[in-house]
Image: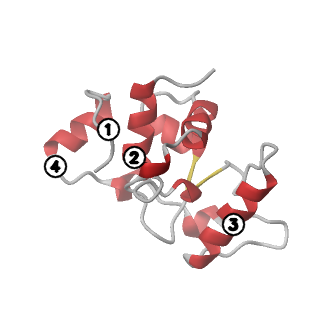
Amino acid sequence: PRPTPRFSNYVYRLVARVPKGRVVTYGQVAAILGAPRAARAVGTALRHLPRPLSKKVPWQRVINASGGISARGDVLRAEEQRWLLEEEGIKFSRGGKVDLEKDRCLAEELECTTVEDKIVVATGAHDRAPR
């Protein structure tokens, strides 16, 4: 099932804060949003990212908990994700993994800039899409 539009918007707002050259995991996004068991819902939200938002929401910066890219049957998208990450300076091991110790963006680094943003990320207070 698809996540609710509200949850998807929270995912998009949070992922939009991940800086270039850094990654987060699906589970990490879910946990920050207060839904630690919703890693698959995060992936589904990103899979259904509206095309107009694809320039604002760096979907490629979200990877799986082992540091790999989750293909889920779409090999071309997985190749595109790896290419986009490599363009940002992310290195992959021979096994196709990112060094999460080095490249993971921690929750503290996703610090919000306004009180309103802090409330939205912490509580999911309203439905605005990413800026």
Residue 24 screen position, x and y as percent: 54, 54
Say which residue label 2 marks: 14
Report the amino acid beneath label 1: Val
The residues tagged by marks 4 and 1 sit, at their Cα atoms, a distance apart of: 11 Å
- Image-based side of 128 in relation to 80, left or right: left
The crowd level at tag 1 (other Cα within 10 Å; few <14, some 14-19, many 20+) is many
Q: Quadrant of the N terminus?
A: top right
Say which residue label 3 marks: 82
Sequence-first tag of 1 and 2: 2
Report the amino acid beneath label 3: Arg
Indicate whether 9 appears above or below 24.
above
Question: Which structural element holds mark 2?
Answer: helix
Mark seen at residue 121: 1
Question: Which structural element holds mark 3?
Answer: helix
Sequence-first tag of 4 and 3: 3
Circles 3, 1 touching at the beta carbon (< 8 Å): no
Sequence-first tag of 4 and 1: 4
